[in-house]
Image (cartoon, rainbow, N blue to C red):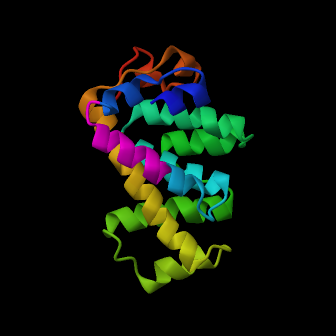
């Protein structure tokens, strides 16, 4: 938790809530760090995260990763579409979003056509497995944040979805 607070300049409330289970917090921090070091580019990783966050209704995660996308210089239309669960006009990023949803919908048993469509947009078989890694990491955090009712930190209020302006998650 100290490393997170030092990196961000504050301790996010969701991290404090996850610390109720040191094992869960440790697992999430490790797996999310591994995902951050994967061969997926930063915007593609954020597409995976936002797709899972919106799918699972984690308003805290949506706010956190809207802030991250903004810091990465992502196009406002991409951020809005991700927040609203709508298709992206950037075909390469849309392939990531669609593939993420297909992996979840099929519990990983994606069709050959689904995998081919993902690969046809410049992604690799390694990237496909890294999408699974991201799904695992952010399914863990979105479910835990919702379960614990993690509040939205003041630092993220400007990035909160409309329905989250009251300061609670989920």
Per the rendered image, the range of residues in magenta is 20-32
**Magenta span contains residue 85:** no
Q: Quadrant of residue 117?
A: bottom right
| Closer to the camera in the image, 128 or 15 | 15
Where 85 falls versus 92 (above or below)? above
The answer to whether 152 appears left or right of 36 in the picture is left
Q: Do we see residue 87 in this rendering?
A: no
Query: Where is residue 10, by image quadrant?
Result: top right
Q: Nearer the viewer, residue 29 or 133?
A: 29
The correct choice, above or below, for 156 with respect to 77 in the image is: above
At x 37%, y 43%, the residue is 26
At which x and y percent is residue 13? 41, 22
What residue sits 50% from the left and 45% below the top?
50
Q: Position of residue 94 (x, y in %)?
A: 59, 60
**On screen, residue 110 above or below 15:** below
Task: Please indicate, yes or no, whether residue 82 appears anywhere in the rendered image.
Answer: yes
**Does 113 sit left or right of 103 as displayed?**
right
Magenta segment's dominant SS is helix
Image coordinates of residue 108 in percent, x first then y, are: 35, 72
Asked if residue 79 lies left or right of residue 110, the reply is: right
């Amino acid at each position: 938790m100290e490393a997170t607070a030092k990196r961000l300049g504050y301790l996010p409330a969701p991290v404090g809530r996850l610390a109720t289970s040191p094992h869960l917090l440790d697992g999430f921090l490790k797996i999310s760090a591994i995902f951050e070091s994967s061969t997926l580019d930063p915007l593609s990783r954020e597409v995976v995260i936002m797709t899972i966050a919106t799918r699972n209704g984690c308003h805290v995660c949506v706010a956190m990763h809207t802030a991250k996308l903004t810091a990465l210089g992502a196009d406002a239309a991409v951020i809005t579409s991700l927040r609203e669960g709508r298709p992206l006009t950037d075909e390469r990023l849309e392939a990531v979003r669609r593939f993420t949803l297909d992996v979840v919908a099929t519990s990983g048993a994606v069709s050959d056509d689904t995998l081919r469509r993902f690969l046809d947009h410049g992604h690799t078989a390694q990237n496909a497995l890294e999408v699974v890694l991201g799904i695992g990491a952010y399914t863990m955090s979105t479910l835990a944040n919702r379960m614990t009712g993690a509040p939205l930190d003041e630092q993220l209020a400007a990035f909160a979805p409309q329905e989250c302006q009251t300061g609670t998650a989920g």
